[in-house]
């Protein structure tokens, strides 16, 4: 694995302080076509650290899952080119989209990483703020992993069980005879036990009653449910909700029927994560979750496959629906938590933000994102060869994306 050079690391918070998030400087005009920066007058004194438009290099924000891959590209780009090493900040997918779409000008980021596709509402925010030409680059695959410390037993769990463990509300658990096992406040009725659960009724919903994994199934650990995961602004959380929570809820018969009769009600119930302490928002940095799990053998965490790859000596992955999150299972789509990763480019910054197109060329080189490239060494699962070729061609041509589906 190539070693990262410390002299190429830039402090994100310092970059934020220098660049700010306000309006672009008045002397900067960005056009759809690249424009040459105005030359300084003879009387101007150079400003230390100032580059084009008062910014030395590129600025990228976005997903904490994409962050280590973007950082590796930035480091290699800085080492191999004449351009400064880009600043890469882990703001979360949603936070990155808000910054990226806030406007055009060197006060705004040039690129953003995402662990899910851009939403239609985010795309419209970009359009409303003048960000009208965006190139979407699928950079490879990742998997959503449920993991824990290697000092504990690994888990084998189904998606429906994950939904039942982490949903804010569940349908009423019932016996084989159709009798409710809980009262309306979610308390287990006298003389009843979790082992009697034979199904669920969507005639009523209660606050999640499951406190231990074994309350859901005797095959699961008899320990308190405690899962450290990303916050609502994270694309990893969005992907987990879509790939695991919603798909798990579909396996509950009455919820599957509800999804047909009232899609909005179903999505609201299936996507809300509990807030009673069983799920703990652990911030945007997946490394924080990994460190927590290493020190908390009874806890589990949700994070990207690349963090599992980099920390296999400390954490292990659960099997989801009987399938382990391996490189092969994720790349061929067999693993239930497989997902695509993206980088979005603000095309209007080409020719103004220094080195934007050369950075895209470095990102889409086989040395970077190929199956034997330096990003694969960090856990990125490469696109198939034909898909990589198509994506590289579109990225280097800065082909604008179409409006995403609602």
Image (cartoon, rainbow, N blue to C red):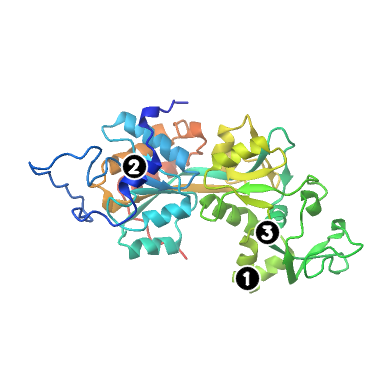
Residue 185 location (% of width, % of height): 77, 68
The numbered dot on residue 265 is 1
- Per the model, the C-alpha gap separating discs 2 and 3 is 40 Å
The numbered dot on residue 227 is none
Residue 101 location (% of width, % of height): 37, 57
Up the image or down, 258 lies above or below 78; here it is: below
Badge 2 marks a residue whose secondary structure is helix
Up the image or down, 204 lies above or below 403; here it is: below
Q: Answer yes or no: do the residues labelled 2 and 3 have beta carbons within 8 Å? A: no
Badge 3 marks a residue whose secondary structure is loop
Q: Residues within 10 Å of mark 2 (few under 14, many from 20)?
A: many
* Residue under the image location 69 percent in, 33 percent down: 150
Q: Residues within 10 Å of mark 1 (few under 14, many from 20)?
A: few
Q: Viewer-proximal residue, 170 or 341?
A: 170
- Per the model, the C-alpha gap separating discs 3 and 1 is 14 Å
Q: Answer yes or no: do the residues labelled 3 and 1 have beta carbons within 8 Å? A: no
Return the residue at label 2.
Answer: 360
- Per the model, the C-alpha gap separating discs 2 and 1 is 41 Å
Q: Is residue 316 visible?
A: no
Return the residue at label 3.
Answer: 167
Asked whether, in this view, residue 89 is left or right of residue 315, the answer is: left
Judged by depth in the image, the label closer to the viewer, 2 or 3, is 3
* Residue under the image location 27 percent in, 53 percent down: 105
């Amino acid at each position: 694995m190539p070693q990262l050079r410390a002299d190429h690391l830039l402090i994100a918070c310092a970059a934020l302080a220098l660049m700010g998030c306000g309006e672009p400087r008045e002397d900067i005009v960005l056009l759809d076509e690249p424009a040459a920066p105005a030359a300084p007058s003879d009387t101007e004194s150079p400003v230390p650290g100032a580059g084009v438009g008062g910014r030395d290099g590129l600025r990228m924000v976005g997903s904490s899952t994409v962050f280590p891959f973007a950082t590796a590209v930035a480091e290699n780009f800085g080492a191999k080119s004449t351009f400064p090493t880009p600043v890469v900040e882990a703001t979360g997918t949603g936070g990155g989209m808000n910054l990226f779409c806030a406007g055009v000008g060197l006060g705004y980021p040039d690129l953003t990483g995402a662990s899910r596709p851009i939403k239609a509402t985010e795309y419209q925010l970009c359009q409303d703020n003048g960000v009208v030409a965006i190139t979407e680059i699928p950079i490879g695959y990742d998997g959503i992993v449920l993991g824990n410390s290697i000092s504990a037993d690994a888990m084998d769990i189904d998606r429906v069980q994950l939904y039942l463990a982490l949903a804010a509300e569940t349908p009423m658990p019932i016996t084989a005879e159709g009798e409710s096992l809980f009262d309306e406040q979610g308390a287990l009725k006298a003389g009843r036990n979790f082992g009697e659960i034979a199904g669920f009724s969507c005639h009523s919903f209660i606050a999640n009653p499951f406190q231990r994994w074994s309350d859901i199934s005797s095959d699961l650990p008899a320990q308190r449910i405690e899962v450290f995961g990303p916050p609502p602004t994270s694309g990893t959380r969005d992907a987990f909700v879509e790939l695991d929570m919603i798909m798990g809820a579909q396996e509950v018969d009455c919820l599957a029927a509800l999804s047909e009769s009232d899609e909005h009600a179903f999505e609201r119930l299936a996507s809300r994560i509990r807030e009673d302490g069983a799920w703990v928002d652990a911030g945007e940095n997946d490394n924080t979750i990994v460190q927590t799990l290493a020190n908390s053998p009874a806890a589990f965490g949700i994070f990207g496959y690349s963090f599992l790859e980099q920390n296999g000596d400390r954490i292990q992955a659960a099997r989801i629906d009987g399938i382990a999150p391996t490189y092969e299972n994720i790349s061929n789509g067999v693993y239930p938590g497989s997902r695509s990763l993206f980088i979005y480019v603000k095309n209007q910054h080409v020719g103004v933000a220094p080195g934007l197109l050369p950075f895209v060329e470095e990102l889409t080189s086989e040395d970077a994102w190929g199956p034997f490239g330096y990003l694969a060494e960090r856990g990125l699962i490469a696109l198939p060869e034909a898909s990589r070729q198509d994506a590289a061609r579109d990225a280097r041509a800065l082909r604008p994306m179409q409006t995403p589906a609602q």
